[in-house]
C-alpha cells in the first residue's frame, strides 16, 4: 500500500523537489488534452492538485484514465512549485502541485447519491442523513467536526489545569424524574425492571462531591425522550461540571476563564474577562426573554403609563386591570425606504404567536417643524402625549414604536421580545458581531403548573433558594428566587446550573413544595437524601451544551450540523433505520410482549 508521508495540506513550497505520498479521494478530475490530467486529491486536511502528463510513467497514465470522482487512492510523486502565473490563491496548497510517479487505487466508487461539495451538499436532509458518511466528506461538515474536537480538547486542557477530574458516570441508571421523559432499558435479568438512560448526570455529580472528589467534569451524553420539536435531538452532549466548597461566583468565573481561553485557542476570538450579568426580571423587561441576543441593544420599555393616559380604551383596560404594556422602537435604518403598514403589521404578527390580542404601532412622521405620531392608534394620544412618547423613545422621522399589552407580565415581555428578535434578524443587527455572552441570574426557583395545580422547579429540584428568600418557601413559593444561572450566547441558552442544596431538611422541603410526598421523594431520590447524611459539602455546578456552542461558533442554525450521526426531525436515523423492530427472541429475553393493537 502506498502509505501517506504527508497530509495534502502539508504540500507546500518548502517541499519542492521532494518525493511525497498522499492518501485520499479523487475530488475533481480535469482532462486538458494532450495527455495532461489534473487530479485534485482530497484528504481531511484539504485538497492538492496532482498532475499527470505525457512524461508520466505509463502505469500512472493508464491508472489516471480510469479514475472517477471519489475513488480512494494513494499517489506518490514529486512536489513541484507552480509558475507564478499558475499559483491558485484559493487553495491552501495552491503554490504547488504533485507530479505523480505512482498511483494506487485502493477502492472505486459507485455513482454518488449527491456530489461531494467544497462547502455543503444541497441534498435534502434525509438523503444527507442516509448517506451521512458521504455528507461528512464535504468541506464544511468536516470542518464542523474538526472544530468540535478542538473545542472539547481545549476544554479538557483548561479544566485539567484547574484541577478538575474527568470522571465517567453510568448510562444505565435508576429512572428519576428530571423534567423530561426518560428512555427506558428493560432488564433481561430482572423481569419487569428497567434501567433508564440519564437525562443528565445531575445526581451522580452531586454524589461525587459527597465522595470528596472536589472538582468533577465529564463530556457527558444525555438522553431525553422528547417529542420532535424545533432543533432537538434525543441524545446530546454537555460539559457536565460540579465543584465543592463553591458558590455562584466560583462557577461563573471558572466558566468565564474557560471560555475566554477556549475561544482564543479555537477561533482566535478575544472574549472579555467578565460576562455581563443580568437578573432574570431585568432580562425579561428589557429584552423580552431570558436568553437575550446582546449582539444588538434595542431595549424594550414599559408603556403602561402612556396607555393609562391615552383614550385607547381597549388597550388601556388591559393595563388598568393590572396588565402590562411594553414598547420597542423600530429604527428606520434606510431613510429612503419608509416602513409600510404591512411591514409593521408583520412585526405585530410575531407577537401573535403568544396569543397576543392587543398590539399596535405608532410611526413618527414629519409634521410642520417637528414630529407627530401616525398609525391607526395615534388618535388616542393627544399632541402633548405624542411629544412625550417621541421624546421618551428618542423616535426619529420614520421610526416606529411597536406596542403590545397583555394581562400577564411574562406574556407581554415575550411578545415584545419576539418583535425584538425579528428586528435583529431583519435589520441585520447581528451580522458580523462575533460572540456576545451574558449571564442570566436570579431566576425564580419555582413556577406554578396551572394544569397540575402545583409548584414545579424551574430548573431542577436540587437548586438552592437564595438565602434572603428562604422565608417565602412556606408562605409564597412564587416569590422565591434561586441561586440559578444560565449562560447565554448570541441569543441561545448554552448552559444552566445552580448552587445546590446539601442539607436533607431543605432538600425535603423543596420536594414537598414540588408535590413530592416523603414516600415519593424517598422512592425516587432516597439515595441522594441518604448521601446527604454523611457530610455533604456545599457545592455548585453547571452544564454547557457542547452541540449548541459548536453550532454557534460554526455559524450553523441546527445542532445536527455539528453532530456526526444525528437523528432526523422525526427522531429517526435514515441510515441505520433506527428505531427498528427487534426479534421475538429478543423480546422474550426481555420479558416483553408488544401489544398488537398498539403496533398498528
Ligand atoms: N443537570 C442540569 C441540566 O442538565 C445542569 C446543572 O444543573 O448542572 O440542565
Image: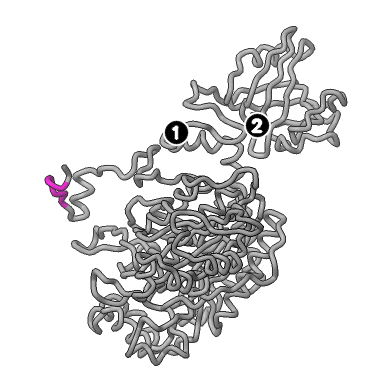
Mark 2 highlights which residue? 42
Quadrant of the image occupied by residue 215 = bottom right
Q: Could you tell me which residue is drawn at 60 percent across and 14 percent down?
A: 66
Q: Nearer the viewer, mark 2 or mark 1?
A: 1
Q: Could you tell me which residue is drawn at 38 percent across and 63 percent down?
A: 199
Of 326 and 482, nearer the camera is 326
The reply to whether the residue tagged 1 has its Cβ within 8 angstroms of ligand 1 is no
Of 47 and 435, nearer the camera is 435
For marks 2 and 1, the one nearer the N-term is 2
Q: Quadrant of the N terminus?
A: top right
Region rendered in magenta? 593-598
- CA gap between label 2 and label 1 equals 24 Å
Q: Residues within 10 Å of mark 1 (few under 14, many from 20)?
A: few
Of 399 and 434, nearer the camera is 399
109 with respect to 336 (left or right): left
Total labels: the figure holds 2
Could you tell me residue 417's position as x and y percent? Answer: 48, 61
Q: Could you tell me which residue is drawn at 49 percent across and 21 percent down?
A: 111
Q: Residue 124, labelled with which disc?
A: 1
Could you tell me residue 178's position as x and y percent? Answer: 35, 69
Q: Quadrant of the C terminus?
A: top left
Amino acid at each position: 500500500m502506498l502509505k501517506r508521508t504527508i497530509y495534502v495540506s502539508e504540500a507546500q513550497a518548502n517541499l519542492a523537489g521532494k518525493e511525497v505520498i498522499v492518501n485520499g479521494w479523487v475530488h475533481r478530475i480535469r482532462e486538458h488534452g494532450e495527455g495532461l490530467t489534473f487530479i485534485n486529491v482530497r484528504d481531511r486536511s484539504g485538497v492538492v492538485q496532482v498532475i499527470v502528463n505525457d512524461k508520466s510513467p505509463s502505469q500512472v497514465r493508464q491508472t489516471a484514465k480510469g479514475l472517477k470522482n471519489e475513488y480512494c487512492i494513494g499517489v506518490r510523486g514529486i512536489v513541484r512549485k507552480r509558475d507564478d502565473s499558475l499559483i491558485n490563491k484559493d487553495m491552501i496548497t495552491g503554490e504547488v502541485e504533485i507530479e505523480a510517479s505512482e498511483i494506487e487505487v485502493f477502492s472505486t466508487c459507485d455513482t454518488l447519491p449527491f456530489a461531494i461539495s467544497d462547502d455543503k451538499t444541497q441534498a435534502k436532509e434525509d438523503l444527507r442523513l442516509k448517506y451521512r458518511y458521504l455528507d461528512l466528506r464535504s468541506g464544511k461538515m468536516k470542518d464542523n467536526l474538526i472544530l468540535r474536537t478542538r473545542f472539547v480538547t481545549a476544554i479538557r486542557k483548561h479544566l485539567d489545569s484547574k484541577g478538575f477530574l474527568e470522571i465517567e458516570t453510568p448510562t444505565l441508571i435508576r429512572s428519576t424524574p428530571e423534567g423530561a421523559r426518560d428512555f427506558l432499558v428493560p432488564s433481561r435479568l430482572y423481569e419487569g425492571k428497567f434501567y433508564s438512560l440519564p437525562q443528565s448526570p445531575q445526581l451522580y455529580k452531586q454524589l461525587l462531591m459527597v465522595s470528596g472528589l472536589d472538582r468533577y467534569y465529564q463530556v457527558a451524553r444525555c438522553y431525553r425522550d422528547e417529542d420532535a420539536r424545533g432543533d432537538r435531538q434525543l441524545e446530546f452532549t454537555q460539559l457536565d461540571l460540579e465543584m465543592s466548597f463553591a458558590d455562584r461566583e466560583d462557577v461563573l468565573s471558572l466558566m468565564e476563564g474557560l471560555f475566554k481561553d477556549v475561544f482564543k485557542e479555537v477561533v482566535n476570538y478575544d472574549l472579555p474577562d467578565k460576562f455581563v450579568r443580568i437578573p432574570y426580571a431585568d432580562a425579561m423587561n428589557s429584552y423580552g426573554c431570558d436568553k437575550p441576543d446582546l449582539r444588538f441593544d434595542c431595549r424594550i420599555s414599559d408603556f403602561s403609563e402612556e396607555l393609562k393616559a391615552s383614550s385607547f380604551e381597549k388597550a388601556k383596560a388591559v393595563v388598568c386591570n393590572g396588565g402590562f404594556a411594553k414598547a420597542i422602537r423600530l429604527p428606520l435604518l434606510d431613510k429612503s425606504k419608509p416602513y409600510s403598514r404591512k411591514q409593521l403589521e408583520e412585526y405585530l404578527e410575531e407577537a401573535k404567536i403568544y396569543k397576543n390580542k392587543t398590539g399596535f404601532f405608532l410611526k413618527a412622521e414629519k409634521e410642520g417643524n417637528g414630529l407627530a405620531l401616525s398609525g391607526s392608534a395615534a388618535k388616542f394620544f393627544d399632541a402633548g402625549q405624542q411629544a412625550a412618547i417621541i421624546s421618551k423613545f428618542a423616535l426619529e422621522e420614520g421610526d416606529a414604536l411597536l406596542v403590545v399589552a397583555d394581562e400577564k407580565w411574562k406574556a407581554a415581555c415575550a411578545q415584545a421580545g419576539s418583535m425584538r428578535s425579528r428586528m435583529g434578524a431583519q435589520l441585520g443587527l447581528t451580522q458580523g458581531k462575533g460572540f456576545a455572552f451574558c449571564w442570566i441570574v436570579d431566576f425564580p426557583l419555582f413556577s406554578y403548573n396551572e394544569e397540575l395545580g402545583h409548584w414545579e422547579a424551574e430548573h431542577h429540584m436540587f437548586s438552592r433558594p437564595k438565602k434572603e428568600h428562604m422565608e417565602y418557601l412556606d408562605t409564597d413559593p412564587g416569590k422565591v428566587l434561586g441561586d440559578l444561572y444560565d449562560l447565554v450566547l448570541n441569543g441561545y441558552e448554552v448552559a444552566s446550573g445552580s448552587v445546590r442544596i446539601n442539607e436533607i431538611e431543605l432538600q425535603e422541603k423543596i420536594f414537598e413544595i414540588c408535590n413530592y410526598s416523603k414516600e415519593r421523594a424517598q422512592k425516587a431520590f432516597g439515595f441522594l437524601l441518604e448521601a446527604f447524611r454523611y457530610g455533604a459539602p456545599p457545592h455548585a455546578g453547571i452544564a454547557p451544551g457542547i452541540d449548541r456552542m459548536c453550532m454557534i461558533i460554526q455559524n450553523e442554525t441546527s445542532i445536527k450540523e455539528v453532530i456526526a450521526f444525528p437523528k432526523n426531525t422525526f427522531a429517526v436515523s435514515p441510515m441505520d433505520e433506527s428505531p427498528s423492530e427487534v426479534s421475538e427472541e429478543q423480546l422474550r429475553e426481555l420479558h416483553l410482549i408488544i401489544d398488537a393493537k398498539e403496533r398498528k
